[in-house]
Image (cartoon, helix red, strand yellow):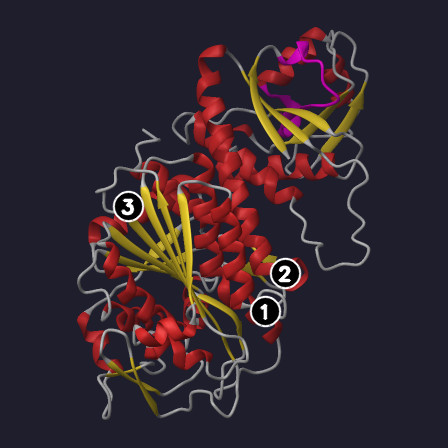
Amino acid sequence: MNYNAKAGDPSRQRTPCLVLGIFSRRKLSDAAKTVDRASSGFLTSILKKGDMDGEPGQTLMLYDLPGTLCERVLLVGCGTQKDYDRSKHSEAVGKAISKLNSGHTMEAILCLPALAPATTDLYTQLRDAIIKSNEATYRFDQCKSDPKPPKRPLKKLTLLVSDRKALKIAQKAVTHGQAITHGINLAKDLGNMPGNICTPSHLAEQARRLGRKSSKLKVKVLDEKQMETLKMGALLSVSRGSRQPAKLIIMEYHGGPARSKPVVLVGKGLTFDAGGISIKPSPAMDEMKYDMCGGASVIGTLAACAGLELPINVVGIVPASENLPDGAANKPGDIVTSMSGQTIEILNTDAEGRLLLCDALTYSERFNPAIVIDIATLTGACVVALGSHATGLLSNNDTLADEILEAGEHCNDRAWRLPLWEEYQKQLDSNFADMANIGGKGGGTITAACFLSRFTKKQKWAHLDIAGSAWRSGIHKGATGRPVTLLTHLLLKRSNQLK
């Protein structure tokens, strides 16, 4: 969908549909009041008939309002005015866009109530609206023989602001929002693609395709022979059980000064995880195609970064593999040697993501990074601890952790920090190697991060566990595209594109 912004009087807009907010007890928003005056009280008279009270989730489509230039007016319930916050605003946007997309309105102007300045700023509110609109219209039907898309879907959405002073802010929100949604959609598409199509080689080709679109993005892919030369024994041990060869995808975006240290993003790219010899239970195993959502989020973030041509250097690294049971697969009790030279006793072959990441994190040292952030669907324990609402965050640097938390709060793609205390490290002790790949039942998310911390001692590093936030299960099963919004916001902030 195309987005733009304009300033003006809502009652003077020539459009197929004007979207207005109504608060509880039929209270008109400011924009609705303007339209009501232009139509000589038509909105007020309609609302008095009782078809809409302004409660959340309610919509009412009106046609041919007198005194206006619009063909339709869509009224959207916003709830009580005092409770109208960021969440309610997002809900109202989603409801409005879903209604429009399933109808016959291909263009619309969105004029929902403004949030109080104490709640959020105009830029954030408008960017949120674009991201929510994208969520409401996203479809994954590439694998359906007869997808049946909407006959007349919404194709253009204009965000209306009150005056020209706000237009510059609105246009920036549109530019940033469109780039972020492009990155989110790419991450969703990769995540939703089945494992027989989205193999490590497919993931590598999508990265190459992205690189061909931007002169600032250089992509190279290491094969297993090259990884053997680098002595990536941990990463390669995971792919031994699969017929699909592992790939190490490196995406270098050069937007800043040549000598400026890059931000390095490392994303787990496990395109399917059956657990290996420690095989997973069969219920919901199909969802293990989502075990590459960390890698997908890195590719999506680099797409947003390149689309915005941000003045910053960023490196994306995606170790990609499958984890399947086979005669050559890792066995519980096997010992492998990582690229760092540290040895690892594999007590559970289903704790394979950290084996991919540890070698990729060691590889990242060659870029002399300013910071390193890894993103992975790493532990079921994180789902138990935080559910699907927050991403787990662990870090060896308080300043970096605070930066990530602030970015998540600002863009509503939130994270929650867990401890990384030295006491947890003892749970990784092994009688036969430098460390085990699991730390027992307690604190699984923390001990997984403790494992990774042993390969990032030279770096300012943070780990994002997205096992709960990367996809939804059930009737609305599908990838969420998180944390592309969080990562892109962090890069916007670091490149001085935001105040």
CA separation, marks 2 and 3?
A: 31 Å
Q: Distance of mark 2 from mark 1, alpha carbons?
A: 9 Å
Q: Is residue 462 visible?
A: yes
Residue at the spot x=47%, y=38% of the render?
Answer: 307
Front-lying residue, 438 or 328: 328
Q: Which residue type carries mark 3?
A: Glu
- Label 2 with label 1: CB-CB less than 8 Å: yes
For the image, the number of numbered tags is 3
Q: Position of residue 183 (x, y in %)?
A: 51, 45
Residue at the disc numbered 3? 403
Q: Which residues are magenta?
A: 10-29
Within the image, what quadrant is residue 266 found in? bottom left
Question: Which mark is first along the chain, 1 or 2?
Answer: 1
Say the numbered circle drawn on residue 287. Answer: 1
Q: At 82% across and 39% down in the image, what residue appears? A: 151
Residue sitting at 81 percent across and 16 percent down? 64
Q: Is 364 rendered above or below residue 336?
A: above
Q: CA distance from mark 1 to mark 3?
A: 31 Å
**What number is the disc on residue 477?**
2
The percent coordinates of residue 239 (x first, y second) are 46, 78
Mark 1, secondary structure of its residue: helix
Relative to 486, is 34 on the left or the right?
right
Q: Nearer the viewer, residue 218 or 192?
A: 218
Q: What amino acid is found at the position of numbered circle 1 in the picture?
A: Glu
Q: Secondary structure at mark 2?
A: loop
Answer above or below: position of 424 versus 164: below
For the N terminus, the image quarter is: top right
The reply to whether the C-beta atoms of the residues labelled 2 and 3 are less than 8 Å apart is: no
Please, what is the three-letter code of the amino acid marked with disc 2? Lys
Could you tell me which quadrant the C terminus lies in? top left
Q: Earlier in the sequence, mark 1 or mark 3?
A: 1
Task: Look at the picture and state if 260 lies above or below 285.
Answer: above
